[in-house]
Amino acid sequence: MSILTLALYGSRARADQNPDSDVDLFAITSETDYRMIVRNNINIACYPRDLAHTRAENGDLYMLHIVRESKDLFDYTGELPKLRDKFTFKPSYESEIQLASDLAWFILDAERIFRNYTLFNRRIAWCVRTILIALSAEARTPVFSARQLSKLTGSLETVILIENKDSDQYDPITTKYLNNFLNTFGRPRPIFTEPSTLDGYAAHFVRSNNVMGIKTISALRVNSVGNGYS
């Protein structure tokens, strides 16, 4: 694989990291397929040039992250400036807000099922960040750090929900804060004709193409084999 561009993004690019923060890297490659490389706390998202350009032109929130805050480590062919030129905001990020809200409501409804609290806390942080980044993108003033995002809500609860992402401990106050957040900034809980079981949410996530929701339920089912959850 030939890497054309390598850039640092996330907390280490913003210089607001803590000692345990991941090293998040973005690469444009000569490959034809996307792939993610994970080694310990180093994550490299490898994008073919055409895919990166398409996602930027479509206003993708991840690409917004890259074009606004990444710092190039090397970029011999000038790919990052091209990517920044191609980025176009979507008229609305309602779809992203809806999908993240649905997953967050699932987390609240399925709270007792979780055994892996690192997964629990990471998914909560992802939902909160996605909703707030989408709202900031709609206002054309995108922000990404926990502190910047908390200014949108005016609440320290937001900081706690986001910065708790690396914790492997369960704290019941988290669900209270998440419920408060959703009632103010999220979308209403999905309505099901059947009780909101794991299978009900799974079907809903498939219908709505909620990729993160599908991944979360798959992880839960692996962790709960033999426990009779449905």
Image: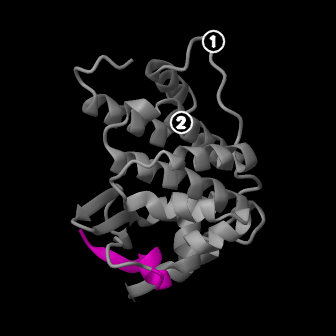
Q: Name the residue under label 1.
A: 193
Residue placed most toward the observer, 44 or 153: 153
Is 190 displayed left or right of 47 in the figure? right
Q: Name the residue under label 2.
A: 108
Q: What element carries label 2?
A: helix
x, y percentage for residue 94?
71, 47
Mark positioned earlier in the residue sequence (1 or 2) = 2
Vertical arrangement, residue 64 with respect to residue 113, above or below? below
Q: How far apart are marks 1 and 2 (CA)?
A: 19 Å
x, y percentage for residue 183?
72, 43
Specify few, some or many for label 1: CA neighbours under 10 Å numbering under 14, 14-19, or 20 or more.
Answer: few
Quarter holding the C terminus is: top left
- The residue positioned 22% from the left and 20% from the top of the image is 226
- The residue positioned 37% from the left and 58% from the top of the image is 167
Is 68 displayed left or right of 136 in the figure? left
Residue placed most toward the observer, 90 or 179: 179
Q: Which residues make up the magenta segment?
A: 1-16
Q: What residue type is labelled 2?
A: Leu
- The residue positioned 60% from the left and 41% from the top of the image is 99
Q: Which amino acid does label 1 sit on?
A: Thr
Q: Quadrant of residue 2?
A: bottom left
Q: Which of marks 1 and 2 is in front?
A: 2
* Residue 13 shows up from this direction: yes
